Amino acid sequence: MKFLWSTLKVNNMEESLKFYQEIVGLTIDRRFHAGPETEIAFLGDGETKIELVCTQQSEPVNIGRDISWGFEVNSVDEMIAFIKEKGIDIHSGPFEPNPHVKFFYVLDPNGLKIQFVEHR
């Protein structure tokens, strides 16, 4: 069995796309309307994708506090500087649970924890 994608229901497609493109560095693979009230975008250039789904809904998206997506970076310190430059708050960290890994979290526009990880 092959893992294909992880889906995130978003409040605002444009705001979410901006975050995942500018902050995380993902590219849009495809974007389309899936009916009159739903838009879908797949991001990523690898085998596994992120799917963003935006619907005309009355209630805001509610994401569990124990869910996160992790992305590898070359340098946590450089990524923290970049995040701060963009005006995004650090949710928690940085953490160094062992000498081989360092990471921190930010929140995406929908409240999903995004983990940036440096492997040493």
Image (spheres, grey):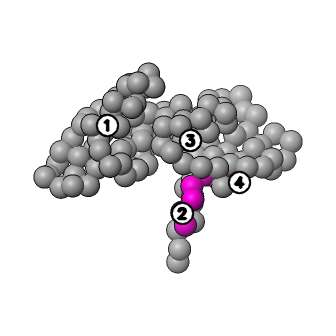
- Tell me where residue 108 appears, x and y as whole percent: 49, 35
- Tell me where residue 12 appears, x and y as whole percent: 66, 32
* SS majority, magenta: loop
Type of the residue with mark 2: Gly
Up-down relation of residue 114 to residue 98 (above or below): above
Foreground: disc 1 or disc 3 = 1
Q: Residue at x 27, y 37 (%)?
A: 77
The residue wearing badge 3 is 21
- Tell me where residue 61 appears, x and y as whole percent: 59, 34
The residue wearing badge 4 is 30
The residue wearing badge 1 is 78
Q: Secondary structure at mark 2?
A: loop
Type of the residue with mark 3: Gln
Spatial distance from mark 1 to mark 3, Cα to Cα?
A: 17 Å
Within-10-Å neighbours for mark 3: few <14, some 14–19, many 20+: some
Q: Is residue 17 left or right of 95 when viewed as pictured?
A: right
First in residue order: circle 2 vs circle 3: 3
Q: Is residue 99 left or right of 109 when viewed as pictured?
A: left
Spatial distance from mark 2 to mark 4, Cα to Cα?
A: 13 Å
Within-10-Å neighbours for mark 1: few <14, some 14–19, many 20+: few
Q: Which residues are magenta?
A: 42-47
First in residue order: circle 1 vs circle 4: 4
First in residue order: circle 1 vs circle 3: 3
Spatial distance from mark 1 to mark 4, Cα to Cα?
A: 30 Å
Residue 118 visible in rendering: yes
Does the magenta portion include 78?
no
Spatial distance from mark 2 to mark 3, Cα to Cα?
A: 15 Å
The residue wearing badge 2 is 46
Foreground: disc 1 or disc 2 = 1
**Which quarter of the rendered picture does the C terminus lie within?**
bottom left
Q: Secondary structure at mark 1?
A: helix
Spatial distance from mark 1 to mark 2, Cα to Cα?
A: 24 Å
